């Protein structure tokens, strides 16, 4: 201690502090949880599903269980094995039960997904058979009981020996069988021979990736086609001309083909406007609404050679019966090209002898076969008269019954007028109900009109809105009486055709299967 100026000097310790701010940086997200000080906890209840229960059925055995041989009791219930699935509560009347689990034949274990709670009773095996050979297989060869098979109709179901998983495979149109990643093989539809391999790699020939399946549980189903001969009386022709399976090719070399494409253009009609298409020489042009209802043809005009459509001015969105259409409107314009088939391949490819005038999309263009008849024309023939017409047994033959009438019709100066548009193939009778009036009768249509010798007779064909025929009033002579009849026949300008369609029995595969016929012709 030092003394200064007579006063002692005292040393006092002093601590200095400095506040330094420090910040900690986190690389992720910081989550802070807090709760109110007055929070009160209440009991919470949560229900958890019971885990699957596995039962070791044969702890002292090493051989797999034979499928279908297992029956055991546990917890007051009897369990039965069916193709790897365990059932309980079987109904003795219907043989139906409740599926509650699966069985692993190779591991000799049963797995229950549903089971009674708090059961301590032992498992009582009532029946169980094991096998020490032939239990599983990795290859399968067999032949179906019948052939030929319907293409793509074979289905195969197997049960894996390692996981008890049920796997299903099916055949395609080319005869390749695949399914579940382990089924690979082929089926010959003509002979019914099936060859299958079960592995995860279809290119594995050494069996490294083979998957064993339970042999006794392999099942399959297929449709066997049988051709039945048709009666010649029913067909109207000798069935020897038809193939044995009833299938007739629709395309042959030298046949006439019609290649056609329909393009659609959604439009908003503007009065007086002309719509020009990307191509010309359309075979048909029509306008339909959103429901497919055609628009009235009076609301537009077309120039098919130029490829244009012109809206009326004013234009109304109505159909032929003046009902309002439902937008949007779509123009459908179709082009067609007739040509001769030069080659037909088994793959379905068809070659034809002339180039197409348009560049048509392959995925939308269609090919139709055409039946040609040559030159055809409507006509009237077999004209004769009868004094008496028997209403109960009318004479639709081509020769008169009884005497002819004294009165006649002057066909030389006033021949019966008939057109290709209105004529049908029919047998007609003009049956007089008085000295001047008569009924117009057709064999299939019945009485369709009435007539009078003082006026032209021209009954309208409702399908074409033109007369079936026209008989001029000036050609009728006098002397007609009630009960007299005039008989004659008419032919249409259409050739006779009979369409026979064969539908193979079985489950339908498509919903829009349909057939369309179109009458085509050229006029000089």
Image (cartoon, rainbow, N blue to C red):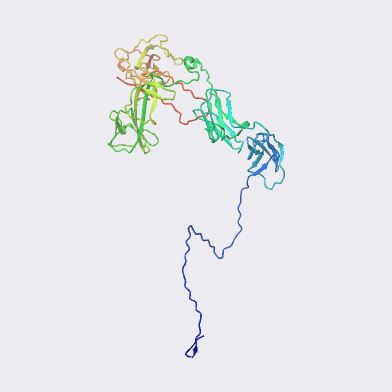
Relative vertical location of residue 7 with respect to residue 150 in this rendering, above or below: below
Most extreme residue toward the bottom is 6
Position of residue 501 in the picture relative to residue 456 (left or right): right
Choose between 270 and 443: the one closer to the eye.
Answer: 270
Residue at screen point 68% across, 41% down: 56
Choose between 342 and 48: the one closer to the eye.
Answer: 342
Residue at screen point 38% across, 37% down: 290
Most extreme residue toward the front is 2
Choose between 305 and 302: the one closer to the eye.
Answer: 305
Position of residue 335 in the picture relative to residue 181 (left or right): left
Work out whether residue 97 can be spotted.
Answer: no
Residue 406 spot, x, y in % from top left: 36, 10
Work out whether residue 174 can be spotted.
Answer: yes
Q: Quadrant of the C terminus?
A: top left
Residue 491 spot, x, y in % from top left: 37, 17
Position of residue 182 in the picture relative to residue 106 (left or right): left
Residue 107 spot, x, y in % from top left: 65, 39
Position of residue 401 in the picture relative to residue 124 (left or right): left
Residue at screen point 61% across, 58% down: 43
Quarter occupied by residue 438: top left
Most extreme residue toward the top is 403
Quarter occupied by residue 268: top left
Residue 144 spot, x, y in % from top left: 57, 25
Choose between 164 and 150: the one closer to the eye.
Answer: 164
């Amino acid at each position: 201690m030092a003394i200064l100026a007579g006063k002692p000097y005292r040393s006092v310790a002093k601590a200095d502090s400095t506040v330094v701010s420090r910040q900690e940086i986190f690389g992720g997200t910081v989550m802070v949880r807090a709760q109110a000080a007055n929070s009160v906890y209440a009991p919470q209840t949560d229900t958890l599903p019971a885990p699957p229960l596995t039962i070791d059925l044969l702890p002292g055995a090493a051989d797999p269980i034979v499928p279908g041989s297992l029956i055991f009791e546990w917890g007051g219930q009897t369990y039965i094995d069916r193709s790897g699935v365990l059932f309980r509560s079987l109904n003795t009347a219907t043989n139906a039960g409740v599926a509650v689990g699966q069985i692993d034949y190779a591991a000799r274990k049963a797995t229950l997904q549903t089971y009674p709670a708090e059961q301590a009773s032992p498992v009582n095996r009532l029946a169980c058979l094991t096998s020490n050979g032939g239990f599983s297989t990795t290859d399968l060869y067999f032949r179906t009981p019948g052939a030929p098979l319907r293409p793509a109709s074979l289905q195969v179901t197997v049960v894996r020996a390692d996981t008890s998983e049920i796997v299903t495979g099916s055949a395609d149109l080319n005869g390749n069988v695949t399914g579940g990643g382990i089924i690979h093989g082929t089926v010959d539809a003509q002979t019914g021979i099936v060859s299958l391999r079960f592995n995860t790699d279809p290119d594995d020939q050494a069996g490294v990736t083979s998957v064993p399946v339970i042999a006794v549980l392999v099942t399959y189903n297929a449709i066997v086609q049988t051709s039945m001969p048709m009666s010649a009386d029913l067909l109207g022709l000798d069935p020897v001309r038809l193939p044995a399976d009833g299938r007739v090719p629709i395309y042959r070399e030298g046949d006439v083909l019609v290649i056609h494409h329909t393009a659609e253009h959604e439009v908003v009609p503007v009065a007086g406007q002309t719509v020009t298409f990307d191509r010309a020489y359309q075979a048909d042009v029509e306008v339909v609404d959103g429901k497919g209802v055609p628009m009235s043809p009076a609301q537009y005009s077309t120039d098919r050679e130029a490829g244009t459509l012109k809206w009326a001015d004013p234009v109304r969105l109505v159909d032929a019966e003046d009902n309002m259409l439902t937008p949007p409107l779509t123009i459908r314009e179709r082009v067609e090209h007739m040509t001769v088939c030069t080659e037909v391949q088994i793959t379905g490819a068809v070659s034809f002898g002339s180039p197409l005038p348009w560049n048509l999309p392959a995925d939308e263009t269609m090919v139709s076969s055409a039946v040609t008849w040559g030159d055809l024309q409507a006509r009237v023939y077999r004209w004769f008269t009868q004094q008496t017409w028997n209403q109960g047994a009318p004479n639709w033959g081509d020769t008169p019954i009884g005497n002819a009438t004294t009165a006649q019709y002057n066909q030389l100066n006033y021949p019966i007028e008939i057109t290709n548009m209105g004529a049908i193939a029919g047998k007609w009778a003009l049956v007089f109900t008085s000295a001047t009036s008569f009924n117009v009768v057709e064999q299939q249509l019945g009485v369709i009109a009435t007539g009078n010798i003082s006026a032209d007779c021209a009954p309208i064909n409702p399908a074409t809105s033109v007369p079936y025929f026209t008989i001029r009033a000036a050609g009728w002579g006098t002397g007609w009486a009630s009960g007299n009849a005039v008989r004659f026949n008419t032919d249409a300008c259409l050739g006779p055709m009979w369409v026979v369609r064969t539908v193979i029995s079985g489950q339908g595969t498509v919903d829009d299967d349909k057939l369309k016929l179109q009458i085509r012709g050229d006029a000089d």
